[in-house]
Image: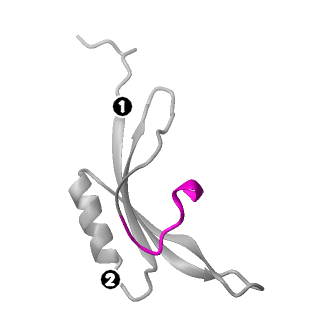
Amino acid sequence: MTNSNESTVKVHYICQTYVEKDSGRDGQADLKIAKQFEYFTASEAQNRAEREVLAEDCAGADAYMISEDPNSGEIGTPSFLVRLGGVPEIDDF
């Protein structure tokens, strides 16, 4: 029998893509999230990021993993598997 009070961490593998967004007056383009995909394995997320960054409208792509405590809803800090093309600074993530 399992104890329902035990904390089971769930790991999410995410591919997130970015597009450039015109920021206005200063003429510099900002990045915004375009798509997010969740996978069962790190390699699936990384492979998707590698494919997505080849698209003409994609500025960049991240593949990362995050852990979630389903009991508390707390989300951990992302651990990047790969960062390709134009991506935000890690501090902006």
Which x, y percent locates residue 27?
A: 70, 88
3D distance between C-alphas at marks 1 and 2: 33 Å
Badge 1 crowding class, 10 Å Cα cut-off, few under 14, some 14 to 19, many 20 or more, is: some
Q: Is residue 93 above or below residue 68?
A: below
Q: Amino acid at mark 2?
A: Leu
State the SS at label 1.
loop
Quick one: quadrant of the N terminus? top left
| Quadrant of res 62 | bottom left
Camera-nearest residue between 6 and 61: 61
Question: If the image is split into quadrants, where does the C terminus sit?
Answer: bottom right
Of 43 and 3, nearer the camera is 43
Residue 88 magenta:
yes
- Label count reads 2
Residue at the spot 29% in from the left edge and 60% down from the top edge = 45
Where, by quadrant of the figure, is residue 7 drawn? top left
Magenta stretch: includes residue 82: no
Position of 89 relative to 70 (above/below): below
- Residue topped by disc 1: 9
Image coordinates of residue 35 in percent, x first then y, are: 45, 69
Left or right for 21, reference 83: right
Q: Residues within 10 Å of mark 2 (few under 14, many from 20)?
A: some
Q: Which residue is mark 2?
A: 54
Q: Which mark is residue 74?
A: none
User: Three-letter amino acid code at disc 1?
Assistant: Val
Q: Is residue 72 above or below residue 14?
A: above
> Residue 28 location in percent, x, y?
66, 83
The magenta segment: 83-93
Say what secondary structure mark 2 lies in. Answer: loop
Q: Earlier in the sequence, mark 1 or mark 2?
A: 1
Instruction: Tell me if label 1 and label 2 are in contact, CB under 8 Å.
Output: no
Viewer-proximal residue, 43 or 7?
A: 43
Toward which corner of the image does residue 32 lie, by quadrant?
A: bottom right
